[in-house]
Image: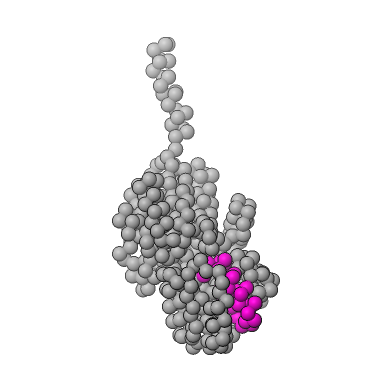
Amino acid sequence: MNRVFKLMLPLALALPAAAMAQDTLKIGALVTLSGAGAAWGQALLYGAELAADDVNAQGGLEVGGKKYKISVIPYDDKYQSAEAVTAANRLVSDDKVKYIIGPMGSAPALAVQPVTEREKVIIMTLGFTNKALSPEKPYSFRPNLTTEETAPPIIAWLVKRFSLKKVGGLFPNDESGQQISNDLAKAYEKAGAALSSKEFFERQRVDMVPLLTRMISSGIDAIELDGNSPATAGMIVRQARELGFKGPIVRNGGPATPEIVAVAGKAATEGMMVTSLQDPDNKEVANYAQRYQDKYKKNMNGFSPAFYDGTHMLFKAMQNAGTVADSTKVRDELAKLKDYKGIQGVVNWSGKARYGIDHQVASPFFISEVRNGQEVTVARCDIDKCVDIQK
């Protein structure tokens, strides 16, 4: 009896440990968490965290017969390239991650790619620059739409709606601002108008009055906000209205309405036209927004659903590849995903015609008018055209 007990004791002791044992899969979040771009950085981070909450609540992510607890490791790049490179090196060398949500900005994205591509680290970047995606950067994906996808049909609709001829825009003097201003100029020209006045500024600037004064005096019909962080866009709106500008203010590109209203006020933002990335009738996104509010005590930023879906797509690719260690296999399976059903609806990868590789998400988008501080959707769009919503 004693002999049997002694033989069984090690096994009995091992069983609870085996039942409790669970590997941890680290996911990096290289995003902006301080300064003017923090709302967008938080949107990316919170999307990844909420996706991780989903799988952890089910006991972990099952891949290749093992379950992994997801741990999201955030780093603040402060919207600066040097900070982003430092953080990327720490994530790769110290934290041993193979998957990163971010970077958020174009300049940080381009700065870290020499590291992430060399180390075969998959990134899910928000960066709007067309240089972020290419066949030479096979580990880089973009789960959000950019100005290059949304601007042409939206601008065609806006030019017709408001009979625009001359538009002015203020842009950050960096990779993002330069790229977005070029995309917008082409789109306005194609629509029969002109981005006739462009002013560039350093991201830390808060006094836009001299730039706006020069722009308004040139006789512009509208002001374009695309390319500016939420807080900066709010300052531009407030200062433009204080200078007496009465024309339309439009925002192609990144969602930021709650933050702009918070800075500029409801009166200044009344009638502002903005790009919306979410279907107003989508109950799944509405439920997600409530989760976001409940956990973080903040209104959801419109970029977040794209990175929530993008993180889940990454998890699905790991499961299809049967590995979390081989990022090349995961990359290949991620690129193969078709008709993926996320909270945004059905999404696919596209972009080969523009970027040489299908690593750009394709999804519907919308035009909204700000009324009493809230977005009211007025048109549904795809990459070809926008159509009025009949109320």
| Left or right of 97 in this view: 280 | right
Q: Residue at x 56, y 72 (%)?
A: 207
Q: Residue at x 37, y 61 (%)?
A: 111
Residue 345 x/y as whole percent: 52, 63
Residue 164 x/y as whole percent: 55, 86
Magenta stretch: includes residue 373: no
| Left or right of 384 in this view: 369 | right
Which image quarter: residue 127?
bottom left
The quarter of the rendered structure image containing the N terminus is top left
Residue 305 x/y as whole percent: 53, 60
Residue 58 x/y as whole percent: 52, 44
Residues 77 and 345: in front is 77
In the rendered view, would you say 285 is above or below 236? above
| Left or right of 258 in this view: 20 | left
The quarter of the rendered structure image containing the C terminus is bottom right
Q: Residue at x 63, y 79 (%)?
A: 243
Magenta stretch: includes residue 231: yes
Taking the image as drawn, is residue 364 in sight? no
Total count of labels:
0
Residues 263 and 140: in front is 263
Residue reaching furthest to the top: 1
Which image quarter: residue 157?
bottom right
Residue stretch in magenta: 228-256
Taking the image as drawn, is residue 80 in sight? yes
Q: Residue at x 46, y 85 (%)?
A: 189
Residues 284 and 209: in front is 209
